[in-house]
Image: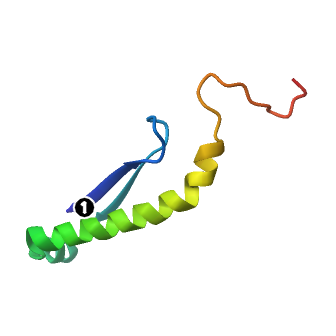
Amino acid sequence: MVISRDRFLDDGRRFHVTLSLASHTIEMHSLLTGLGAEGQQQVGDILVRALNEIQQLLQPTVARAPRPGETSSFGCGT
């Protein structure tokens, strides 16, 4: 079982991230399935809160990233 949440970190589609919780054993699959729809939604809500924190951390870097078509210096003197 996989519970995932997606997020675009910018207004475009360049900075797309997915945060997932995946079961890798039958026992873990059973545990997540046993949560039912409400429990699985709660796990999803936790992933959203984690994505909020990740976005907050990365936002300054995303804001400084050159937009497509903008030139950037590669340190080669041009």
Question: Which of the colour schemes (rainbow, by chain, secondary structure, one colour) is used?
Answer: rainbow
In the rendered view of the protein, which quadrant contains the N terminus?
Answer: bottom left
Residue 13 horizontal/vertical position (percent): 44, 35
User: What residue do we see at 18% from left, 77% from top?
Assistant: 27
User: What residue do we see at 38% from left, 50% from top?
Assistant: 7
Q: Nearer the viewer, residue 7 or 32?
A: 7
In the rendered view of the protein, which quadrant contains the C terminus?
Answer: top right
Would residue 1 be found to the left or right of residue 20 on screen? left
User: What residue do we see at 64% from left, 40% from top?
Assistant: 65
When asked about the image quadrant of residue 8, the answer is top left
How crowded is the residue under tag 1: few (<14 C-alpha within 10 Å), some, or many (20+)?
some
- Is residue 32 positioned above or below 20 on the image? below
Residue 72 horizontal/vertical position (percent): 74, 30
Residue 5 horizontal/vertical position (percent): 31, 56
Q: Answer yes or no: is residue 23 visible.
A: no
When asked about the image quadrant of residue 67, the answer is top right
Residue where numbered disc 1 is placed: 3
Q: Nearer the viewer, residue 21 or 66?
A: 66
Would residue 77 be found to the left or right of residue 35 on screen? right
- Is residue 47 positioned above or below 30 on the image? above
User: What residue do we see at 21% from left, 75% from top?
Assistant: 28
**Helix, strand or loop status at disc 1:** strand
- Is residue 42 positioned above or below 72 on the image? below
Residue 20 horizontal/vertical position (percent): 33, 60
Amino acid at circle 1: Ile
Q: Answer yes or no: is residue 49 visible.
A: yes
